[in-house]
Image (cartoon, rainbow, N blue to C red):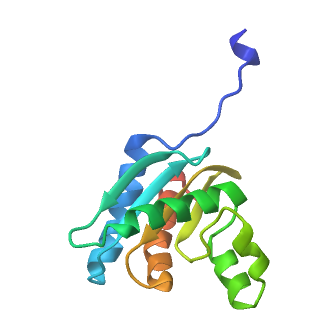
Amino acid sequence: MAEKLATKKMLTLDLAKQLAAAAEAEARKNNWNVVIALVDDGGHLVYLQRLDDTQYASIDVATRKAQTAIAFKRPSKIFEDATAAGKVAVLSLPIISLEGGVPLVVEGKMIGAVGVSGVTSQQDGVVAKAAVDELAKIVGG
């Protein structure tokens, strides 16, 4: 029976904390106060970190950026760019159309996503990229 069960890579709490630490280091290096949210492949929150003095509204925004990235299997920046180009129909989707949400991919499979909010969307994207880069170091990619 066990051989019929699928196995998959997953975003564990320990891994989420490690990725958040890399994102936090990038934010602190730039003196940016942000919220860092990590969700699993179903969009469920695994870990959330709010740096001191970050506005509380960023808790929801960071989480929704991560959920957008995993739900649509692409960075949330795609939707920001589409909106900026006048493709406002994307606004009817259950998304947040701001940069800062990025899928986490291991061996071609999405294990979750990171979302960052607190500064400009471009700066949020820089912080999110630090988490993605850390994942690449961990998995050797």
Q: Residue at x 29, y 76 (%)?
A: 33
Indicate the position of residue 68 as horizontal and vertical percent values.
62, 62
- The residue furthest top is 1
Whole-percent x, y for residue 126 in the image: 47, 79
In front of the other: 123 or 19: 123
Q: Is residue 99 left or right of residue 91?
A: left
> Can you give x and y, in whole percent of width and height, for residue 51 in the image?
26, 67
Task: Judge by depth and name the residue closer to the eye, 3 or 73.
Answer: 73
| Residue 22 seen in the figure | yes
Quadrant position of residue 92: bottom right
Tell whether 72 sits left or right of 32. Answer: right
Q: Can residue 107 be spotted in the picture?
A: no
Side of 93 where 25 appears, left or right:
left
**Residue placed farthest to the left in the image?**
52
Q: Nearer the viewer, residue 114 or 55?
A: 55
* Vertical placement of residue 57 versus 13, above or below: below
Q: For residue 3, which quarter of the picture?
A: top right
Considering every residue shown, the one lying at the far front of the view is: 92
- Please state which of residues 137 and 132 is positioned toward the viewer in this rendering: 132
The residue positioned 46% from the left and 40% from the top of the image is 12
Quadrant location of the C terminus in the rendered image = bottom right
98 w.r.t. 65: above or below: below
- What is the residue that sits farthest to the bottom in this orientation? 85
Toward which corner of the image does residue 49 lie, by quadrant? bottom left
What residue do we see at 51% from left, 44% from top?
A: 11
Look at the image and tell me in which quarter the N terminus lies.
top right
Number of numbered discs present? 0
- Residue 131 percent location from the top left of the image: 45, 64
Q: Please determine whether, in this image, residue 117 is positioned above or below residue 42.
A: below
Q: Could you tell me which residue is drawn at 70 percent across and 84 percent down?
A: 83
